[in-house]
Amino acid sequence: MSVIHVQAPGLFTTVQDLGRGGYGPMGVSASGAADPVSLRIGNRLVGNDEGAAALEMTLLGGSFLFPQGAVVALTGSDFGAILDGSIIECWKSLEIRPGQTLSLGPTRSGARCYLCVRGGIEVRLFLGSASTHILSGLGGLDGRSLRKGDVLNIGQAETSLPNAALSAQALWRLAPRKILRVTPGPQCDWFPESSQHLFYSGTYHVTEEANRMGLRLEGDPIPTRSGAGEMTTEGVSLGAIQIPEGGQLIVLFVEQQTTGGYPKIANVISADMASVGQLRPRDEIRFEKVSWEMARSLLREMEDLISG
C-alpha cells in the first residue's frame, strides 16, 4: 500500500472529507472540509469521488514524503508549494515520483489549502465519514491534527485517469468572496430596522478566535429589540449568524454546537460557505441580503460550475 510520511505537519492539518450529515440530533455536527468546493474540485482533478478524504491545511502547510509516489492536486489557497525545489501550481493534477517530498509554507491568500491524492486518504470511518472532528476527538487520524512522524495510508484508486482541470473562468467565478450573501435568520424580527440597517451596512473583522467551530467577528454592536427577552435553546444550522449579549457576531461553522440560545439575525447561504472556510483572522467582510430563491439559484450555479 502507498503511504505518505508526515515530515512536518504544518500549523493545523487534519484529514477531512465532506462530513457526516444527519447526526445533529445526537449532538454531532457534520465537520468535514471547511472549503468543500476546493476539496471536491481537488478530488475530481485526481480522479477520485468528490467526497474522498484529503488533507486540510490551515494558514501554514506541512511537508510530506511520498515513498511510492502518487498523483496529487493542491486546491484552495496558495501555500507556496514546492516539490523537490520546483514550484508547484494549484488547481492541476501532478504526478509525484517515488521518494519525492512536497513542502508547503505560509498562506499567500486565504486560510486553507487541500492536498488531494488519487485513491484518497484511508482512515477508519466514524459515523460513515473520515472527517476529523476535533471537538469530540473522533474521526480522521486518531481524532486529532497531524503530527511529525505520522504515516497516512493512500487508498486504492477506482478510476484510471484524473479529470480535466476547470477553466480559469470557472475558477474565477468560484473564488472566495468577502461579501457574504445571507438569508434572514429565524429571529430576524428580534432586531429593529435600525439594527438591521447597521448589520447590512457595517464591516466586520474576523478575530483571532476564529476556528472550525465558529468565527467571532468584531464590528459595531448590533442591539436586539427592547424587551425581546431570552430565547429557548434550539437547533442551529451551519452558517447561522448568532448575536449574543454584547452585540458582536458569531458565524457558526463546520464543528458548531448543534444547539444554541442566542438569536440569529441571518444565515450564510450554502453557496458562500466555502468562502467562510477561507477567511483568515483580521480579514474584513460584509453581508448582503438575498432572497430564498436567489440563494437556491446561486447554489445551482455553483454546482454547475463544479461539474464543468
Image (cartoon, rainbow, N blue to C red):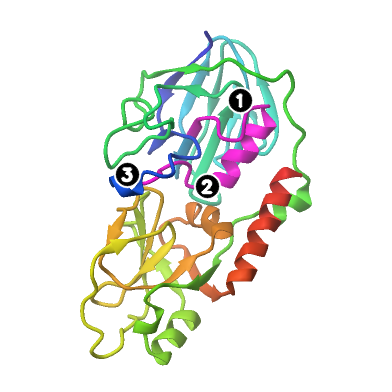
How many other residues sit within 10 Å of disc 2, few (<14), some (14-19) or many (≥20)? many
Residue that carries the numbered disc 2 in the rendered image: 35
Q: Looking at the image, can residue 77 be seen?
A: no
Marks 1 and 3, how far apart in space? 42 Å
Q: Is residue 284 above or below residue 228?
A: above
| 123 lies left or right of 116 | left
Seen in the picture, residue 191 relative to 119 is either above or below; the reply is below
Q: Is residue 253 visible?
A: yes
Q: Which of the two discs, 1 and 2, labels the residue nearer the N terminus?
A: 2
Q: Considering only vertical position in the picture, is 37 above or below 126?
A: below
Q: Is residue 68 magenta?
A: no
Q: Which residue is mark 3?
A: 28
Under tag 1, what secondary structure?
Answer: loop
> Whole-Å distance between the Cαs marked 1 and 2?
28 Å
Residue 70 falls in image quadrant: top right
Q: Residue at x 49, y 35 (%)?
A: 17
Q: Quadrant of residue 52?
A: top right
Q: Which residues are magenta?
A: 29-55
Magenta run includes residue 39:
yes
Which residue matches tag 1?
85
**Amino acid type of the residue tagged 3 in the rendering:** Val
Answer few, some or many: residues within 10 Å of disc 3's Cα (few below 14, many 20 plus, some between 14 and 19). some
Q: Amino acid at mark 1?
A: Gly
The percent coordinates of residue 159 (x first, y second) are 69, 20
Location of residue 203 in the rendering, given as x and y in whole percent from the top left corner: 46, 76
Q: Nearer the viewer, residue 280 or 277?
A: 277
* For marks 1 and 3 on the same chain, the one whose residue lies earlier in the sequence: 3
Q: Are marks 3 and 2 in contact (CB under 8 Å)?
A: no
* Spatial separation of the CA atoms under disc 3 and disc 2: 19 Å
Quarter containing the C terminus: top right
